Image: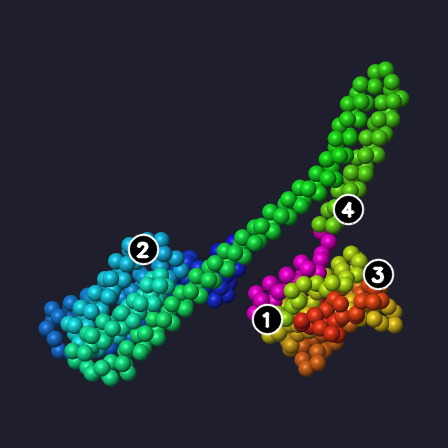
Amino acid sequence: MSDTDPTERAHPLDGFGHPAIGRRQVLTKTLWIGIWLVFLTSPVQDLVKTDRAPAATVAGWFGLAAFVVCYLSLVFRYTSKVSEWRVVYASFGALLALAVGLSFAFGTSWLGLFVYVSVSAGAVLPMGQAMWAIPAVTGVMVGVGLRTDSMGDLLGSFAVLTVLVGFAMTGVRQLVRTTIQLRQARATVAQLAANEERLRLARDLHDLLGHSLSLITLKSELAGRMLPNHPDKAAQQVADIEQVSRQALVDVREAVSGYRRRTLAGELAGARTALTAAGVEADVPLQAPVVLPGEEGETALAWALREAVTNVVRHSGARRCTVAFTSRHTLDGPVVELSVEDDGRGGSAAAGNGLTGLTERVDAVGGSLDVRPGARRGFRLTVRVPLESLDPLDPPGKGGGGTDGTAPGSSALGSRA
């Protein structure tokens, strides 16, 4: 999925660090940035209430409008990425000049403009330059304000605020750019994984079919040459071709079946993604247990995890979902236990189609499935699948994350399947 996929950015916060796309996102970002224009109330009140010559008032409105446009263009366009540094420096210089000129011309009530200059320095300038530009802007503001106010009044009103807001904006800028880098890295990892899977598929197909097809081609040529004079030998070659073709077909079917088989590692990754996307806190192990049953047992556990998480996302209304694996010895032999528990609203314990089908899958591998209310609320689904073999010297918790074999997390499902 690309980092601009609209389905990935359905949540309002998912657009953080992205350029605005479409009218809705432009409006949202404009409102988010525009809300911080609250410090302009003092200049606006000064223009409205102070009795000045009409030309001075008009000049003040034009100067204030130019300042706002310059400020918004800086923080709106260049917070996440800067492509034209000359434009940035020119705009920042114009912003500072307007703040100084308007404050000199109209008085103390306009000193709040320097807050926006400090924010712009923290938002768009390189980190090293922002570190000295923010104190410098504050110093200029204090120098301008000393014409009418005392140092104590300036430090208590605007100076400290200008410094703090400016440096806070450097952190926000860094967070935005880190978010973008993480998204790019995630997209790169996904692309590399897809490339690796294609290479694996290509290798498997070559290994499966390369020898068989070469043998079929060779025997076809032999059969063609033998057919006029030795039809019996040609018939034998055709029979060999049939046998090789059937074996190649079996190999391909087995390989495709392996590609389609669900694995715990894949389902764990999918569970984390699905729960996080649904706004559910996911306490899910990063890796599958070390001790696993055979392919059929692992597939049954993978389906159980998938079904449980699907029900948590769709029906539970939960805030937290916990997944845990435990390897333990029972009277029937060693088993791997999967538990999925949520803190949702719970519901009826009647089995639906999904839970019924899941029970049949687990029964087919000799396992057991249990669904019951959670310890406090929500549901808890537990699946136990027997291990084919387990070294008696291995501790029962080898596949888990603690002394009791429990991996970090344990999750619940409602019987809402």
| Residue 389 to residue 116: above or below | above
Q: Quadrant of the C terminus?
A: bottom right
Q: Amino acid at mark 3?
A: Glu
Earlier along the polypeptide chain: callout 4 or callout 3? 4
* Proximity of marks 2 and 1: CB atoms separated by less than 8 Å: no
> Where is mark 4, residue-wise?
254
What's the residue at 63%, 68% (across, down)? Answer: 313
179 vs 286, left or right, is left
For residue 413, which quarter of the picture? bottom right
Q: How far is disc 2 from disc 1 in space, using C-alphas? A: 42 Å
| Residue 206 to residue 61: above or below | above
Residue 28 visible in the shown view: no
Q: Give the magenta-colored segment's residue range.
A: 260-281
Colour scheme:
rainbow
For residue 262, which quarter of the picture? bottom right
Nearer the observer: mark 4 or 3; the answer is 3
Q: Amino acid at mark 4?
A: Glu
Q: Is residue 203 magenta?
A: no
Q: Amino acid at mark 1?
A: Val
Residue 85 is labelled as 2
> Where is mark 1, residue-wise?
280
Q: Is residue 265 magenta?
A: yes
Residue 215 is labelled as none
> Where is mark 3, residue-wise?
388
